Amino acid sequence: MALTENELWYSNIVPVTFTNLKTRVKKLIGSDYPKLKFVSPNEAYTESNFPTVRLRLVDMVEVGNGLDFDAIEAFSTTFQADVISLNAKDSERIRTYIIKVMHDLGYRTLSVPNIVRDGNKWYGFARFRRLVQETDMTIIQ
């Protein structure tokens, strides 16, 4: 028996979060960074375009289900955003806007390490966590 779309609601968490992040960040700073590239979770990660943002799911743990265990009600999701650019200032600024948007989506920030350099590239990382429930409309719309 195939599951219905409603029974698989959690399969939309990653693409909806990615789309919301990309759309909102580009709206805020897209004019300052017209070549800002977002790499979706299912795309191969390449560093050919700078600046680049990659959002990936780190962890997704089931935290709620029905009494008869036939339906998943909630997941605790952890995402990591990676920002890669050719200078530290851009990595820091873009990451700051990513943090703001993720907060707007209801995520809390877990970790914001220092910007690091590898060769001529600067990397900024941030991790976020949020409980996403089946009836959660903040992230779905």
Image (tube, helix red, strand yellow):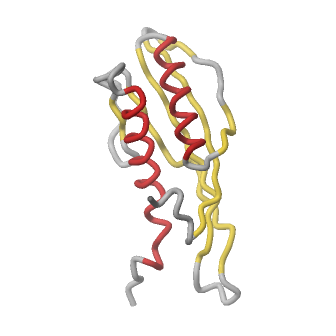
For this view, does 79 lie left or right of residue 2? right
The quadrant holding residue 34 is top left
Image quarter of the N terminus: bottom left
How far from the left and from the top, in percent, is residue 37?
33, 30
For this view, does 60 lie left or right of residue 29? right
State the count of labels. Answer: 0
The quadrant holding residue 75 is bottom right
How far from the left and from the top, in percent, is residue 67?
70, 87
Q: Nearer the viewer, residue 118 or 110?
A: 110
Residue lying at 65% horizontally and 29% vertically, measured from the top left: 112
For this view, does 75 lie left or right of residue 81? right
How far from the left and from the top, in percent, is residue 22?
39, 40
Residue lying at 64% horizontally and 67% vertically, measured from the top left: 62
Residue lying at 46% horizontally and 54% vertically, measured from the top left: 14
For this view, does 64 lie left or right of residue 28? right
Q: Nearer the viewer, residue 85 or 96?
A: 96
How far from the left and from the top, in percent, is residue 88?
51, 12
Image quarter of the C terminus: bottom left
* Vertical comparison of 140 with 57: above or below: below
* Vertical comparison of 117 with 64: above or below: above
* Vertical comparison of 63 with 1: above or below: above
The quadrant holding residue 69 is bottom right
